[in-house]
Amino acid sequence: MTFDDIKELLVAKFGDDVITGEERSGMQPALLIAPDSIVDVCRELRDNPKTYFDFLSNLSGVDYGVDAGRFGVVYHLASIPYRLQLTLKVSVEHDRNSEELPTFKTVSTIYRTADWHEREAYDMLGIYFEGHPDLRRILLPDDWEGYPLRKDYKTAEYYKGIKID
Amino acid sequence: MITVNSKYEQALQRYNEKIADAATEDMVLNMGPQHPSTHGVLRLELITDGEIVKEVIPHLGYLHRCFEKHAESLTYQQTIPFTDRMDYLASMNNSHVWVMGVERMMGIDKDIPKRIEYIRVLMCELNRIASHLIAIGTYGIDIGAFTPFLWCFRDREHIMGLLEWASGSRMLYNYIWIGGLFYDLPVGFEERCKEFVEYFKPKMVELNQLLTDNQVFIERTANVGVLPMDVAINYGCSGPMLRGSGLKWDLRRIDNYSAYPELDFDIPVGKGEMGTLGDCWDRYKVRVDEIAESVKIVEQCLERLQKELKRTPDFDPRAKLPRKITPKAQDYYIRGEGAKGELGFYFIADGKSEIPFRAKSRGPSFNNLSVLPEISKGVMIADLIAIIGSIDFVLGEVDR
């Protein structure tokens, strides 16, 4: 299965709207997926006998910068039976000054790997995953303020009234 | 108790309620962060009913050193020492994967001289042996066998000495650089390494007699913590965890990177010899067998390094170092087989600066540990210790 075959397979199953674009310039081409259908796409790719993408290698949250005003999640899938790799990307526009966090659907129901990776993305970048069973902070303490890997993060001056030098 | 003022705090409140409820009927037991059997600063919250563990809630982050934040504010070359501190028991493997990723993004991975590739593989495999020796030795201690620990550390010390000789440092080497190496091997390294291999082979036989076939050890580990293959894949387990469940999946063979396609070695998998497939004993056995395979690789590397890739006076391991490391604008995910499993780095390069726009690391221990709550439901507390030891995680890599 080549990259184009996978794309055709998804379009045939879910229609044209599911793929919003593609990136072919780098060494690893990526499919841009509509954020609402990422769960269905992952389930189809995992269960379809032609692809069997059963291993989620990595899930990374990305802050595309203050100017871009976008947040995204990148999924690196691997198919153990076919020895394939595939990159999926979802992203939404988001105003970082609003109270709301950028929100995506969780894929932890399909890949349990995503459970901790999504908690990490929530912890570090403030990306909220709808339907996640236990979305607490994972590496930082529960009372931490702010999201350190955001591009506009300012280091805190005080921690619980103690000055940080 | 924290009041709910947004949907973002609901999970925290659910967790607090669960602990409060458990405290009335069951007992909540804190294991760690300072307990030696948690192999570092891992804190496990156990909800127990007598000796039975009903639920395990891991709490991470005690060793969080902001690896990704550092990587996003330093250049690619400057981050190499930080990768060493991820899995600090197998530092060479970490920097190897990082360096490979950057080299491929720069498009210089094909220009690396053969001798450098072989030295890298030699170092990685020596480090893998050292890492597995710790895994085996400390696993023995968890179960109650003290001697294997001392023997493993005695043999590991020889490897530490060799690596220190080459790089100048015992644990955190900063030896593999983008486009080359810190230094060539010191004169006489190959011979000394060969002596070590000859010394080490009978020691492994001894260790097997002492621990692998030990009836007490088998009783404690066989049929304990069974991890079926489909669960392992779904939880993203890799390395000896996945191979212990019977799947032949080793990225050194799948991706064929560096000098591995030219080397001859097997991939040991768990067979369920002493109990069920995927139990603690299988995972332990895979590590023991992998040591033997790594010794084979080390021997082949030494053979080539002494013959066709012999050192020459004008050989400069820094000759190919790029002056300025600014990869083209792209994103790239590199994966390689670390000592614990699939180690991955995800880079986003913007094409203008020497600093990655985004660098995410995928630590194998992080994913291997995430399966712990699943496979330790309803086990005894003593068995939980055996399961934790068989996962062989390093907290430096879990917390990063």
Image (cartoon, coloured by chain):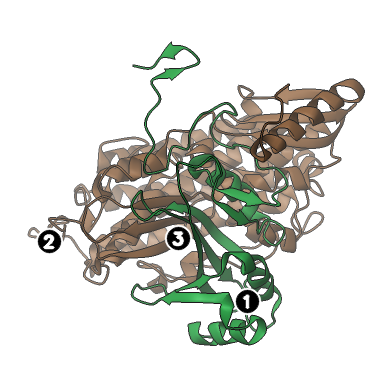
Badge 3: residue crowd in 10 Å (few <14, some 14–19, many ≥20): many
Residue B208 appears in view = no
Position in image of residue B170 (x %, y %)? 34, 35
SS at mark 2?
A: loop
Of B265 and A144, which appears nearest the observer? A144
Amino acid at dot 3:
Gly
Q: Which of the chains is brown? A: B
Q: In which quarter of the image is residue B372?
A: top right
Residue of label 2: B312
Q: Quadrant of residue A17?
A: bottom right
Of A28 and A71, which appears nearest the observer? A71
Q: Which of the chains is green? A: A
| Residue at the image position 77 percent from the left and 23 percent from the top | B29
Residue of label 3: B336
| Residue at the image position 27 percent from the left and 68 percent from the top | B109
Relative horizontal placement of residue B75, taking residue B146 as reference (left or right): left
SS at mark 1?
A: loop
Are the residues at dot 1 and dot 3 in contact (C-beta closer than 8 Å)? no
Amino acid at dot 1:
Pro
Badge 1: residue crowd in 10 Å (few <14, some 14–19, many ≥20): few
Residue B274 appears in view = yes
Tag of residue A81: 1
SS at mark 3?
A: strand
| Residue at the image position 26 percent from the left and 42 percent from the top | B167
Amino acid at dot 2:
Thr
Relative horizontal placement of residue B97, taking residue A114 as reference (left or right): left
Of B328 and B335, which appears nearest the observer? B328
Position in image of residue B123 (x %, y %)? 35, 52
Disc 2 versus disc 1: nearer the observer = 1
CA–CA distance between discs 3 and 2? 30 Å
